[in-house]
Image: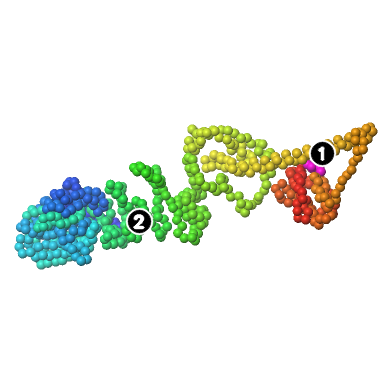
Amino acid sequence: MKHLILILLTCYSTLLNSQGLLNNLKGCYPFDGNAVNNATTGAMYNGTYGGGVTAANNRFAVPNMAMQLNPGGPSDKIFLYSTGFINGAQILTASLWIQHGGNMNSEIMYHAAMCGVTESWALKTIATGQGPIIQVSTVGNPCGTPVPVSVQSGIVNGAWHHIVFSITTTGITLWVDNTQYSTSYASMPVTWGGNYPIIIGGSSTNGPVTYTGRIDDLRFYDRVLTNSEITDLFTNNPSCNASSGTSPQPAPTVGNYCSAQNNALTGNYQIDLNGFNYNFTSPNNTIGKVVIGKTTCGTGMARLDVLDNVIGNGIYSSCSAPTSNVAIRGVGGNLQFANITDIFGVVGESLLGTNNFTGVGAGVAGFCGPMNSNTMPQGQSIGVYGNSVANGGNWAGYFEGDVSIHGAVWGSQYGWMFSDRRLKKNIQVLDKVSERIKLLNGYTYYYKTDEYKNHNFSEREQFGFIAQELKEVFPQLVNEDKAGFLGVNYVGFIPILLQSQKEQIEKIEAQELAMLNQQRQIDELKALVQVLVETSTGKFSSANNAQSITLENNSTVVLNQNAPNPFAEHTVISYNIPSDFSEAKIIFSSINGVVLKSVDIREKGAGSITVYASNLSNGTYSYSLIIDGITIDTKKMVKE
């Protein structure tokens, strides 16, 4: 509550100061170049200019709101003729802003004496070994014996300074940038008289203009201002118009001018816009920049340059407008230049300063919720990162139109999918997919582009599945979006097609093997029938000396085809193992290379193995004869 009362008192005090500055205001000269009197009290004119006086930017860089004094002829000055209020005044206070141009030992402003021979008072610049100073002096009784009295303070060339001086019967008080300097002298009357002008830009004796620089917002009072009123003039720039109140322009000496003394903040500073805009202008499109965060004066890389080495957020923007919510908007456009090669709306860079980078870095990062929901892998530097996990987001990235990608795409659905065995568990071979594929249909179709314009569908003919049908057969390949529409993982269908093709190949090979066995049996039966016919009829073939023999070589390695093949419950495999080999075995494997059984053959010579497989799944298998570590032969057998 105490803080609230203090704030209210401070605001009320500022308002009273601004209103009080209209009391006893005798003249207000804004030097805005239009010579319009819009003050409610006092005389407000820009005066009469000589040829060397031009309009210039004021201390807020607003064009034509200050006057530039340049070296020239005797008339190149500003003459203020409406100064009758000085007649007989016992107190005179002047407030003005100046930007000194460097010409030394010159008079910024003076009042001609009623005798017309010298100044009654003057505001001057004086050269010293330590730089220029501001001096206010008076000669007391201008028509009598001069009694010079002065007070002075240092200034900086090229910087704007606020000057206030009061001349009374007891002394002179000077304020420079809200710092007070005073001198006093013996009491004597101030007998200024006559309607002589106030002259800005030169003295009454040297003729040509000797002061160079800018002047802005000159005011005259016939009373001494309070310290709080001088502070108000220095910080708030109150208007000369009673209805205007305090101007929203900022205190010009909050901070420093780079070439002037440092005016560091001693507390938080707030600017209430009150429905108005705060504009940083750059006349005629000159290069003017706003730089935030640098410890020394300097220019940035952009119009707005923000540097942060402490908090970690260069710019943090939040928007909660009722109709439009765009926190930061970047627009790049080639509007007036013919040879621009690069145009970007927003550029984000992630720069790694050290080699031991262990966090996460993204040039542009977008989150559907708080940043603490970030799932970006540690130690990664990424150009653009999107996260839709937090706060129920729909899409991590959403593009309307074609997307061009130059490089590999890694993900769980498209492009280069992670398929390393080390990342997987519960691995199983697809089985009997051919039967399920027969339940599917392929279609040609067109999208409803008129009805669903926001999807930006292609108008060309498409090939694909109906997601609802595919979901009945392979539900793993169908997913549903936030709006309830189904999508198909066509890439995931590739392993299914591959396995179906293998199943067909295995069936064809088994059929071919069965046909060969059948043909061999037919040939054997035909030969047997021929022998029986010849024996029973006594009719033999034309080769009367024909005979049958069996040739055998016990040193030959033989692995015969199992019979029968295909088989249902059991089959027999015959073989011959020469006696000069030391170790032999037969290994049974699945079609995928998984070893099912290994049988050692201990007896040499001819032999056989009866294989029982009633509990074995239907399919194609292989068996290999290995002697002394060398695979001699491999054959396939089919279980039905």
Q: Measuring from the top left, give residue 427's x and y in whole percent.
A: 66, 50
Q: Amino acid at mark 1?
A: Arg
Quarter occupied by the C terminus: top right
Q: Is residue 446 magenta?
A: no
How would you classify the magenta stretch by its main secondary structure? loop
Q: Earlier in the sequence, mark 1 or mark 2?
A: 2
**Which residue is the site of mark 1?**
520
Task: Out of 83 and 592, give the one closest to the viewer.
Answer: 592
Instruction: Describe the colour scheme in one phrase.
Output: rainbow
Q: Residue at x 51, y 53 (%)?
A: 376
Asked if residue 349 lies left or right of residue 573, the reply is left
Task: Out of 228 and 400, give the one closest to the viewer.
Answer: 400
- Categorize mark 2 by other alpha carbons within 10 Å: few (<14), some (14-19), many (20+): some
Q: Secondary structure at mark 2?
A: strand
Q: Measuring from the top left, give residue 426's x and y in whole percent.
A: 65, 51
Q: Secondary structure at mark 1?
A: helix
- Categorize mark 1 by other alpha carbons within 10 Å: few (<14), some (14-19), many (20+): few
- Residue 576 image label: none
Q: Measuring from the top left, give residue 136's x and y in whole percent.
A: 15, 62
Which portion, as a residue range, is magenta? 563-567
Q: Residue at x 34, y 51 (%)?
A: 303
Q: Measuring from the top left, give residue 577's x and y in whole percent.
A: 82, 52
Camera-near label (1 vs 2) is 1
Q: Amino acid at mark 2?
A: Ile
Quarter occupied by the N terminus: bottom left
Q: Residue at x 24, y 54 (%)?
A: 59
Asked if residue 510 lies left or right of residue 543, the reply is left
**Which residue is the site of mark 2?**
292
Q: CA distance from mark 1 to mark 2?
A: 93 Å
Asked if residue 489 lies left or right of residue 10, the reply is right
Residue 429 visible in this rendered orientation of the protein: yes
Labels 1 and 2 touching (C-beta < 8 A): no
